[in-house]
Image (cartoon, rainbow, N blue to C red):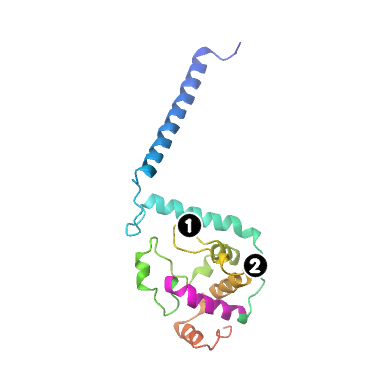
Amino acid sequence: MSSEPAPARQTLTAFVAGAAALGAVMALGGLAIVQFGLFDTRASTPHGPILAWATHTTFVHAAQRAAPNISAPAQFTPAEVEAGFKDYDASCAACHGGPGVARADWTRGLNPSPPYLVSTARQWTPGELYWVVKNGVKMTAMPAWGAVRSDGQVWDLVAFLESLPYLTADDYARMRRGAGPPRAR
């Protein structure tokens, strides 16, 4: 025989039953949204503020959680920066721009809009940048470059991103002409 009084058991039972019913209704509602195409999937319509916050915050926290397990090189060489620049200019600049380089017009059709990366190294650690570049970001058009780049090539891109906040438009233009990265300032 239970030592709980009967009204307490009834209250607990009612609470559990109510929570289960609420969970079932929410699951059916979610299924209905998916099954009947009720979620707006158009890239031309921005996410609402709650969904935008939730997806971006989850992305940031995922990168921060993974980064401590990634060992970044102690220092990047000018050759790594130059190799990263060549890859960035060929594969990334259209979406993310660069010093004196606008993003391609077609990026206005992406949702969310790809960020300019000029100051990204001031906000992200090398390990976080490596994780993002290697793994990509779902629902953003950011590919997982690790699927088609070696770890060394991904680190080269990170090397360039680390130098990006210090490049001027003239520096970027010189690098495009093949003059290599500017000397450290």
Q: Residue 72 carries which label?
A: 2
Residue at the image position 56 percent from the left and 64 percent from the top: 147
Viewer-closest of 35 and 183: 35
Q: In which quarter of the image is residue 34?
A: top left
The residue stretch that appears in magenta: 80-95
Of all residues, the one furthest to the top in this rendering is 1
Residue at the image position 46 percent from the left and 56 percent from the top: 56
Q: What element carries label 1?
A: loop
Q: What element carries label 2?
A: loop
Relative to 132, is 7 above or below?
Answer: above
Relative to 177, is 69 above or below?
Answer: above
Residue at the image position 58 percent from the left and 79 percent from the top: 83
Secondary structure mainly formed by the magenta segment: helix
Q: What residue type is labelled 1?
A: Lys
Relative to 172, is 10 above or below?
Answer: above
Location of mark 1 (residue)? 138
- Local crowd at mark 2 within 10 Å, few (<14), some, or many (≥20)? some
Tell me: 46 left or right of 170.
Answer: left
Q: Quadrant of residue 95?
A: bottom left
